[in-house]
Amino acid sequence: MALSATICKADLNIVDMDRHYYQQHSLTVAQHPSENDERLMIRLLAFALHADEFLSFTKGLSTDDEPDLWQKSLSGEIELWIELGLPSEKRLKKACGRAQQVILYTYGTGSAEQWWKQIQPQVSRFKNLSVRHLDSSITRELASGMRRNLDIQVSIQDLEVTWDSDQKTLSFRPEVRY
């Protein structure tokens, strides 16, 4: 018998002073059976960092040809492709060929560092790719605040992120690698 997704509801209040974006989003996010709390919270963070009325979650882990989040134009063109983890060069090439802009969030320490050293020379040719890294201490803290019903305030100013939930407040800056 196949396991079903766990549903998470999040009220996300975003104050992004860098982009002048101020919105409340009521989100319903499906957590794939193989997805841990850390990865789900990183998806919510990525949504907050790039929030837009057209940004949406995809089928994610259950589909090979879709990112974790994407933003499509009214005509169906992929404007923004957001990927999480340590994808292959082939996957990044495919994303960069299909989307106007690709943003990758890596996380963790040891394996992410090693992955970046190996793949950086190959992906440097993709001009529409940005790579940002989230320190494992931050992602573990985000994961520890995971609940099925979340109320989160996210403030962004000068690339500094403040994540405030009823469990904790974190301030950090994603490291831009490329």
Image: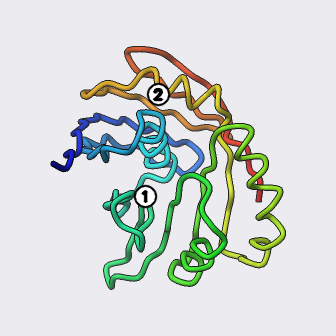
The residue indicated by pointer 1 is 68
Helix, strand or loop at label 1? It is loop
- 139 left or right of 127 in image: left
**Residue 145 left/right relative to 19:** left
Q: Where is residue 133 in the image (x, y as percent from the top left)?
A: 68, 45
Q: Name the residue under label 2.
A: 143
Q: How far apart are marks 2 and 1 (CA)?
A: 17 Å
Considering only vertical position in the picture, is 172 above or below 42?
above
Circle 2/circle 1 CB separation < 8 Å: no
Give neighbour class at mark 1: few <14, some 14-19, many 20+ (Cα, 10 Å): many
Dot 2: what SS? helix
Q: Which residue is drawn at 57% across and 84% down?
A: 97
Quadrant hosting residue 53 = bottom left
Instruction: Judge from the rendering whether residue 92 lies leftward or rightward of residue 175; answer left or right.
Output: left
Outermost residue toward the front in this view: 1
What amino acid is found at the position of numbered circle 1 in the picture?
Asp
> Disc 2 marks which amino acid?
Ala
Say which quadrant the C terminus sits in.
bottom right
Residue 66 at x, y percent in the picture: 40, 69
**Relative image position of residue 166 (x, y in whole percent):** 37, 15
Height in image: 122 above or below 25? below
Q: Nearer the viewer, residue 63 or 170?
A: 63
Q: Going from the N terminus, do you reach mark 2 or mark 1 first?
A: 1
Name of the residue lying farthest toward the top: 167
